[in-house]
Amino acid sequence: MARFGQDSLHPSITDPDMDSMRILSETALRFPDALSFSSGAPYDGNHDLANLSFYTDRYIKHLRDKGVPDARITRLMFQYGPVNGLIQDEVALMLRKDEGIDVPPEAVMITHGFQEAALIALRGLCASPDDVLLSVSPAYVGIRGAARMLDIPIRGVLEGPDGLDPEAVAEAARAVRAEGRRPAALYLVPDFNNPSGTVLPLAARRRLLEVAEAEDLYILEDNPYGLFARDGEAMPTLKSLDTAGRVLYLGSFAKSAFPGARLGYLVADQEVADGSGTVRTLAQTLSKAKAMYSVGSSTLSQAVIGGILVEHDHDLRSATRELAAVYLERLDAALDALAEHFPPGADHGVEWNTPRGGFFLALKVPFTADLAAMERSARDYGVSWAPMSMFHLEGGGRHEMRLGFSNLAPEAIREGIARLARFIEDTPRETSPGTQRPTSRETAPATPGAAA
């Protein structure tokens, strides 16, 4: 049998940093009795098999009500569909209602989740080997993976207490340009960043758009968690604030509607003129890449999502308020349990941030929180978590953990934090753990323990 040497494969396949998602998922399989804070899986207690047929039928009824003939509907459901999707109209209406993003349907591309949207956007925006992607750091591992698969260099911009600093972005863009390369785009999650949970303040959002225009940057705004803010605390998206056409918006239905549908979307309303002078949206132009990656997204999955949107009058924000309450209850349970086991004033060397929503929080500990420590925690203490170093693009996070609480019930969260506390208490401290920048406004309290 033929045998490949690792050096004969693409570097992205042999790069150990590309193994993060597999390692975390396999930890759960290897230690099935461990309570897992290592993933950001969505809550799955609200799924009902009957909904699959209900929402599919609802979308088919919607098409009939619009006057689409049954022969056409049958073909749409059973055959290959349009490359950029069936439900562009429904998604455009949802964006207008939920986010104040007013774009035509032809500016929307339906994708296989965030990951395909990121691959397509990067492939379109980064045209030269000298193009560089800037990214918030720490960052979701999927963006580094997408850039690595496409051989696009990525430069991390370390976030501060209030998320990504626009001036740090400008500085990074100028540094890349001074090296003779072009900073093509910037990736970030302004609302409840994965992994740190930070939220970019409104003034910083406006300033970041100014920086993008001044530095000729496009922004890839990833927003999987924005619907899950506390009531009255939702922030306007960068895309809704963008008046210069600098933002490409990447969304997903995995967290808000139906993870198994594997559907997301790319919003790119920028105009592109071809050699004949014909002007189309960037989303339409990028359909060439979409066709080569996946031909088109599942029409049945789109029918289910389309039915959900139609049934709820394209108002997914209102339709997910009960789900948002579930996540906020779990966040509060995690914060309360941490405060109980690591009270202010005690000599435990533990700190954490206090996100206002999302799926994650960051915990700082007085020892190296690496994969070996995580495996020992899962094996001997029955609790797993994710090393924050996995998410840093330029090094860092060695003494931090990411805790994902989204798919654990409050009682399991409390038990998991109790197990984690025993692990932390039993792990020898390092004499000089080093200093790190906090990952959220509340990460650096005046006394040990939770931030005020």
Image: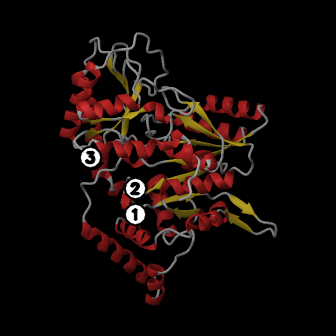
Sequence-wise first label, 2 or 3: 2
Asked if residue 273 is positioned above or below residue 429 in the image, the reply reads below
Asked if residue 316 is positioned above or below residue 106 in the image, the reply reads above
Instruction: Work out whether residue 101 can be spotted.
Output: no
Q: To which quarter of the image does residue 105 belong?
A: bottom right
Q: To which quarter of the image does residue 402 belong?
A: top left
**Residue at the location (55% across, 74% down)?**
82
Q: Nearer the viewer, mark 3 or mark 1?
A: 1
Q: Amino acid at mark 1?
A: Ala
Measuring from the top left, give residue 420's x and y in whole percent: 26, 28
Query: Mark number for residue 254?
Result: 2
Asked if residue 61 is positioned above or below residue 147 in the image, the reply reads below
Looking at the figure, which quarter contains the C terminus?
top left
Horizontal arrangement in the rendering, residue 410 relative to residue 247 (left or right): left
Horizontal arrangement in the rendering, residue 342 relative to residue 176 (left or right): left
Q: Which residue is mark 1?
A: 261
Measuring from the top left, give residue 315's x and y in whole percent: 39, 60
**Residue at the location (77% across, 65% down)?**
274
Q: Which residue is mark 3?
A: 326
Q: Residues within 10 Å of mark 3 (few under 14, many from 20)?
A: some
Q: Nearer the viewer, mark 2 or mark 3?
A: 2
Q: Residues within 10 Å of mark 2 (few under 14, many from 20)?
A: some
Query: Mark number for residue 72?
Result: none
Pointer 3 with pointer 1, Cβ within 8 A: no
Sequence-wise first label, 1 or 2: 2
Instruction: Work out whether residue 293 can be spotted.
Output: yes
Pointer 1 with pointer 2, Cβ within 8 A: yes
